[in-house]
Structures are given as structure tokens and as C-alpha cells.
Image (cartoon, rainbow, N blue to C red):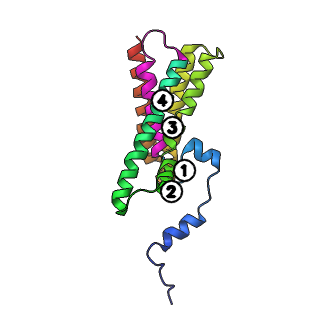
Amino acid sequence: MQAPSPKKGEAERIAAVSEPKPRRIDRLLFGSGRSIGGTVYGTILAMSVIAAAGGTGSPDPWRLAGFVASSAIVFWFAHVYASGLDESIRSGRRLDIVSLERVARHEAAIPLAAVPAIVALSLGALGVLRESRAIWLALALGVATLGVQALRYSQIEELGRSKTLVVVGLNVGLGLVLVGLKAAISH
């Protein structure tokens, strides 16, 4: 006799319970659970700001770090607001503070993804690194983060080797386009 199949939604609940909880630092640095969108988005945002604002003249690393941080916060707020509106419409009720806090936590990967770039730029501002080297380090960390997120995606989706190479190539390629933009603007 065959065992009865799980009720609708039961398989997802079992999978969620049996899936190991990510450590807090892992969640902060690499996204949460099965979600990588905020980390990818925040990384691309930080790299874009650096490419656009850091490509002219002699960029001030403190100013660049401020641009990256403020852009990440503004875009995070915009995502929280827009997602909150979506959730309110989907649920058919006004958004309450608990729901808004949940949305804000879910979207927190956007500003957190800017932290490595801000740290690298701060090292340049403090004189630990040459200013130009700090800017390139911030961009390199962004490319590396995009590569890691592509690997996470491939692992979550259980992609084979060739599809993983395509996904990593696309993510890293996007990061390298931003690096190329920075190089083109600064020369």
C-alpha cells in the first residue's frame, strides 16, 4: 500500500522546517534563505554609483562612500514602500506595522550589500589604501559578490556544471560591464 501524498502546502512546510537556518552573519552577507535578489540588486546599485560618481576627476572616497550608503538607503526605502503597497493590495487589507517590518527585513539585503563597498572606500579615505586602489577594491568585491550569488543560485536550483558556468558568467559579466563603465568614465 502506498503512503498518502502530503496535503497541499505540507511539502513546503516540511521543507522549510527541515532546511537549516542560516547563521545571522551569513544571512547579512549573502542574503537570506533561498533569496538572493536583494543582495544582487544592492551590489549592482553600489557598483553603479561608484562607476558613475567615482569616474570623474579625483574622487573623494568619503564622498563616494556617502553616495553609496545614501543610494542604498533610498533604494531600500523605495523597495520597502513599493513592496508594502503590493502586499496591501494582494492581502486586501491595509498594511500594518508588523507587515511593514517583515517587508523591511526582507529587503534589508539591499543596503547590506553596499557594506563591502563602503568599507573598501573607507579604507581609502582613512589612508589605509590609496584612494584609487580602494575604489577598484570596492568594484572587485562587487564582482566577487555577484559571482558568489550566482553560485548560490545554481546550488539552490540544482543546476549542472554547464548551466552554472552560464549563470556565473552572466552575473560576473554584468559586474565587469560596470567596471568597464568606471574605466571608460575615468579615462
Residue 59 part of the magenta segment: yes
Residue 44, quarter of picture: top left
The residue under label 1 is 32
Front disc: 2 or 1: 2
Horizontal and vertical percent for residue 34? 51, 54
Q: Secondary structure at mark 2?
A: helix
Dot 1 crowding, Cα within 10 Å, few <14, some 14–19, many 20+: many
The residue under label 3 is 111
Which residue is painted at 46% across and 18% down in the image?
A: 54
Q: Give the mark, 4 or 3, whose residue is nearer the N terminus.
A: 4
Tell me the amino acid under the disc marked 2: Val
Q: Give the mark, 2 or 3, whose residue is nearer the N terminus.
A: 2
Kindly indicate whether the residue at mark 1 contacts the one at mark 3 (C-beta within 8 angstroms): no
Front disc: 4 or 3: 4
Query: How far is mark 4 from mark 2, CA to CA?
Result: 25 Å
Q: Main secondary structure of the magenta part?
A: helix
Is residue 121 shown above or below 87? above
Is residue 97 shown above or below 51? below
Which residue is painted at 56% across and 27% down in the image?
A: 118
Q: Secondary structure at mark 4?
A: helix
Is residue 93 shown above or below 1? above
Residue 14, quarter of picture: bottom right
Residue 45 part of the magenta segment: yes
Dot 2 crowding, Cα within 10 Å, few <14, some 14–19, many 20+: few
Horizontal and vertical percent for residue 19? 59, 61
Q: Give the mark, 3 or 1, whose residue is nearer the N terminus.
A: 1
Answer left or right for 32 relative to 186. Answer: right
Query: What span is colored magenta in the figure?
Result: 37-61
Tell me the amino acid under the disc marked 1: Ser
